[in-house]
Amino acid sequence: MDEPGGYAGPASKSAVVSDDSRAFDVVVVGAGPAGSASALEVARAGYTVALVERGPYPGAKNVYGGVVYGRILDELVPGWWERMPVQRWVTRRATMIMTPTQALTVDMRAQDWGRPPYNGATAYRADLDAWLADQAVAAGAVLIPATVATGLLRGPDGSVAGVRTDRPDGDLTASVVIACDGVNSFLAKEAGMYPAENVAEHTTLGVKETIALPREVIDERFGLSGRDGADIEMIGCTRGIPGGGFLYTNLESVSLGVVVGLTGLAAAKVRPEELIADLKEHPAIAPLVRGGTLQEYSAHLIPEGGYRSMPELVGDGMLVAGDAAAMCLAAGIWLEGVNFALGAGMYAGRAAAAALRSGDTSKSGLAAYRTMLEDSFVLADHRKLRKVPDLVLSQRVQADYPGLLCDLVQGLFTVENPAPKPGLRRLLRLGTRAHGVRRRDLVRDALVGLRSFG
Ligand SMILES: Cc1cc2nc3c(=O)[nH]c(=O)nc-3n(C[C@H](O)[C@H](O)[C@H](O)COP(=O)(O)OP(=O)(O)OC[C@H]3O[C@@H](n4cnc5c(N)ncnc54)[C@H](O)[C@@H]3O)c2cc1C
């Protein structure tokens, strides 16, 4: 596929519900990746499903960095790569460890990633979400855009029985409600599925600039050709505020952003735009974005607490999926939410359909959802990496280790003749002292990392 193609634009922009269809088997709230995947699976199973979206069309209000990792789409939309509105295929993935004046990069290029079934792709959210919603609509889902779900309806036994909306004609009833309303899901909170704790601690703010550059300039600067694309994750670029950065290539723009913990940001009294401005001046980033024109600035919250911050996923007549269930995986070298949302949405749709088939949409009738998630990458990855978000957001990983690692490698790469070459042990001793790193913390963190990633 040479140009982003095969996609004529979001047909789903114009879909509306007719006045006589207020009762559905399932109501899905939120037409992001989780919601569209849920609605698609319910519709495929032959049940009626409404997909309620507050934006004027799916993707209208949504923000992300820009990379979709496609494996789960193989199952959800076979052959997706021939139809999805892709900007570039990610053939280069790098992680950059930074201090204000240094950058140490692990840079992986793989030609395989540029061929089907593809490892990942960059795509604009407005295109991606509308395309995903179109798949659900084509399967029979009824998209209800420009409509806010304002609360839950309850049946006589207290189970969830639909949603209230801000439309003049109001309620939508259903046997199952799937909450895919994104971070800080107020539906999951209203249902009492979130533990009462400080959400800010598990929430980061992502801010992003989309910077226009000519296609050939992007190709040259990032060493790309054709539809190849780059995905660069960064750590140590947020003035010690827990978080990280990213830089992704689209066809004729790049997405540059930072993700920072809310509590750390408030304590540091720094504006997120200042952090992006820092990045644009960093010696490793400035040459990549120089001369670009700011196209768009956007910001959105991210649930980064992982496994331990997830709500209850199943209730009587209700399931929670995607960011609404804090399923975004932010573990340093990964910032993945879309694939987890797609996976969770798909299993939620399947579990809802199975419960409808068996005539039991109570909590126990819907319990298969949790089992499907446990058996799949969605909860398996989160469980395996459950200690990583805290480690990645720790002061040591954020502020101490980047300097230590950069100095260590700079020391190795510096030629000091006639002095003899420094030994690794000496460099480590000097580095840990200079950066105030305790050996036992280093060993303990290395063990957490090895156990999680091993
Ligand atoms: C700056 C940033 C960078 C990121 N980068 C990446 C990346 O590169 N790759 C990646 O995989 N993930 C990334 N993520 C995470 C990713 O965006 C999310 O994990 C993913 O979008 C979750 O999908 P979702 O469907 O669960 O929720 P969302 O995409 O948030 O969708 C929720 C939907 O619900 C709608 N909605 C909300 N409330 C209501 C309501 N009451 N009534 C009706 N509709 C409602 C919203 O309008 C929205 O359409 C990033 C996030 C941010 C903020």
Image (cartoon, rainbow, N blue to C red):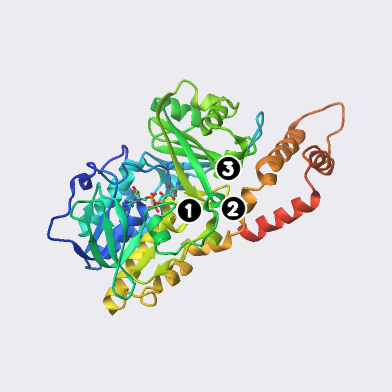
The percent position of residue 84, horizontal first and vertical second, equals 31, 47
For residue 389, the mark is: 2
Quote the CA–CA distance across marks 2 and 1: 11 Å
Q: Is residue 40 visible?
A: no
**Which of the labelled discs sits on residue 243, or is there none?**
3
Secondary structure of the residue carrying numbered label 1: loop
Write down the residue under mark 1.
328
Quadrant, the N terminus: top left
Is disc 3 placed on a helix, strand or loop? strand
Going from N to C along the chain, the mark reached first, 2 or 3, is 3
Q: Residue furthest right?
A: 419
> As rendered, which of 16 and 216 lies closer to the eye?
16
Dot 2 or dot 1, earlier in sequence? 1
Mark 2–mark 1 CB contact (< 8 Å):
no
Which kind of residue does numbered mark 2 sit on? Pro
Classify 10 Å Cα crowding around label 1: few (below 14), some (14-19), many (20 and above). Answer: many
Q: Residue at point 24% right, 48% down?
A: 145
Q: Position of residue 320 (x, y in %)?
A: 40, 62
Name the image quarter holding the C terminus.
bottom right
Q: Badges 3 and 1: C-beta atoms under 8 Å apart?
A: no
